[in-house]
Image (cartoon, rainbow, N blue to C red):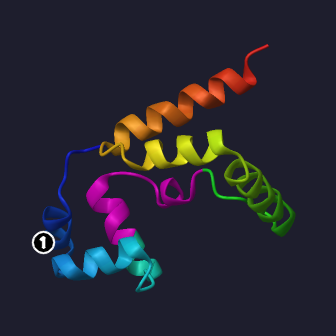
Amino acid sequence: MLDMTQTNLAEAVGITFPQIQKYERGANRVSSSRLQQFSNILNVPVDFFFEGSPKSSEDKENVVADVAKIFATSDGLSLASSFMRIKSRKTRQLIVELVDALVNER
């Protein structure tokens, strides 16, 4: 969203580019202090990184069930596959916002 590269972020935090990639892939855990650094550099609140995440275990179970339903259909698989090929995170976020708006439209 800020057009900041992973290399720029790594330099700003004082770590290596491969370490940023490990965080992104989930290979390494992000400490709370490191998360605070990211939040400061990106000028967003820490809870920005948790937007849309399920709050309770029941919510998590519902999300897992919904994902299973999506992947059980050919349309869902096609949509997910196409969505993941969109390079721009901003564009993907706009698509999510559009779908949310359509769902909530009355």
x, y (%) of residue 15?
A: 19, 81
Give the side of residue 40 with respect to residue 78, left or right: left
Q: Nearer the viewer, residue 106 or 34?
A: 106
Q: Is residue 28 above or below residue 71?
A: below
Per the picture, the main secondary structure of the magenta-coloured stretch is helix
Label 1's element? helix
- Say what amino acid the circle numbered 1 marks: Glu
Residue located at (87% from left, 63% from top): 58
Q: Is residue 69 magenta?
A: no
Q: Residue furthest bottom?
A: 28
Residue 35 in the figure: left or right of residue 97: left
At x 54%, y 43%, the residue is: 78
- Residue corresponding to mark 1: 11
Residue 33, relative to residue 70: is it above or below?
below
- Residue situated in front as seen by the camera: 20 or 82: 82
User: In the image, is 104 to the left or to the right of 8?
Assistant: right
| Quarter holding residue 45 | bottom left
Q: Which percent across, then down, holds residue 7?
A: 14, 67
Q: Residues within 10 Å of mark 1 (few under 14, many from 20)?
A: few
Instruction: Give the quarter of the image for residue 57.
Output: bottom right
Query: Which residue is at a point 31% across and 42% down the rendered structure image?
Result: 88
Q: Residue furthest right?
A: 58
Q: Position of residue 105 (x, y in %)?
A: 73, 17
Q: Is residue 41 magenta?
A: yes
Magenta stretch bounds? 36-51
Q: Is residue 31 above or below residue 63?
A: below
Q: Looking at the rendering, in which quadrant would you find the N terminus?
A: top left
Which quarter of the picture shows residue 101?
Answer: top right
Q: Residue at x 32, y 52 (%)?
A: 43
